[in-house]
Image: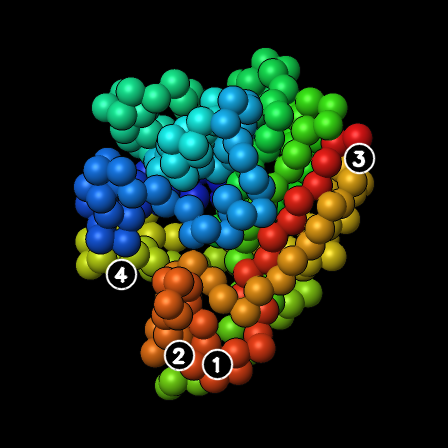
Amino acid sequence: MTNYRDMNRLNWNDRTAVHAKSKFYNIDAFMAGENSQSGLEEAELGDVAGRTMLHLQCHFGKDSLSWARLGAHVTGVDFSEEAIALAQSLNEKLGHDARFLCSDIYDAKEALQGEQFDIVYTSYGVLCWLPDLTRWAELISSSLKLGGIFYMAELHPVTFIYEAVDNHLKISYPYFDNEVRSYESTTTYTGDEDKLEHPVTYQWQHTLGEIISALVGAGLTLEFLHEFPFTVYNMFPGLMVQDDQGRWRMKENDHLPLLFSVKATKR
């Protein structure tokens, strides 16, 4: 298991350099004042001004710093040394008070030294990198103050069973799957042609039931589970279009769930 995580970390170190100069992340626009949230997160989570927030799997901190712009006191955690270094650099340039810690998610409790937060947040493409959701949910619960809120916006797990093949969706993977999946790709989802030195990754499929059960099992009270027929990037090239809000939808089969969000409270 350690080998899986180490290989994923090396891959994400490679990705950070690619993402930092990509049009997909557009750091120049972000540094000029453009926030990175899709609008969904702000609408569902509400006002964060003055509140402490822990952002798990924060990558290079663009979302973390977007929350900081809205007044949150943010701590971001990620296992990629390169991502955390970039996040710290961006934070310094912007003059925010965000803090970034380099730690594997399963070691984050020790890295945080028992600190608790008003909000724990995570989003978009994070759960497939975690082999054990029970430990993930326990970290969330232990990191929240009483009355604290966990919020997540994430790709719907049903999307991971599909591939775009010849302008059609093809079911290529099982929804119920307890085995680790190995993937090899020399490029990333940003569409850039830069080659990754470490192209192999390992990912895990988690059902919606498994995700919710882990959170409830860790003592959190579910406030809502929402599902949406749109997502935040062109997940299936050639089969999707952007709507007037910049969200990506299927050209056909617009009834498929592509995204979900969860809000839960520590009572």
Q: Secondary structure at mark 2?
A: loop
Amino acid under label 4?
Gly
What whole-number distance in Å separates the C-alpha atoms at marks 3 and 2?
Answer: 40 Å
Circle 1 residue: 169
State the residue at coordinates (28%, 54%): 24
Q: Quadrant of residue 258?
A: bottom right
Q: Counting residues from the N terminus, which is met first, the one under dot 2 or under dot 4?
A: 4
Circle 4 residue: 191
Circle 2 residue: 239
Q: Tell me residue 246's x, y (percent).
A: 37, 62
Circle 3 residue: 219
What whole-number distance in Å separates the C-alpha atoms at marks 1 and 2?
Answer: 8 Å
Q: Counting residues from the N terminus, which is met first, the one under dot 4 or under dot 1?
A: 1
Q: Secondary structure at mark 3?
A: loop
State the residue in front, 45 or 119: 45
What whole-number distance in Å separates the C-alpha atoms at marks 2 and 4?
Answer: 16 Å
Is residue 42 depicted above or below 159 in this figure? above
**Discs 1, 3 touching: Cβ within 8 Å:** no
What whole-number distance in Å separates the C-alpha atoms at marks 4 and 1?
Answer: 20 Å
What whole-number distance in Å separates the C-alpha atoms at marks 1 and 3?
Answer: 38 Å
State the residue at coordinates (27%, 25%): 94
Q: Counting residues from the N terminus, which is met first, the one under dot 1 or under dot 3?
A: 1
Q: Tell me residue 64's x, y (percent).
A: 42, 33
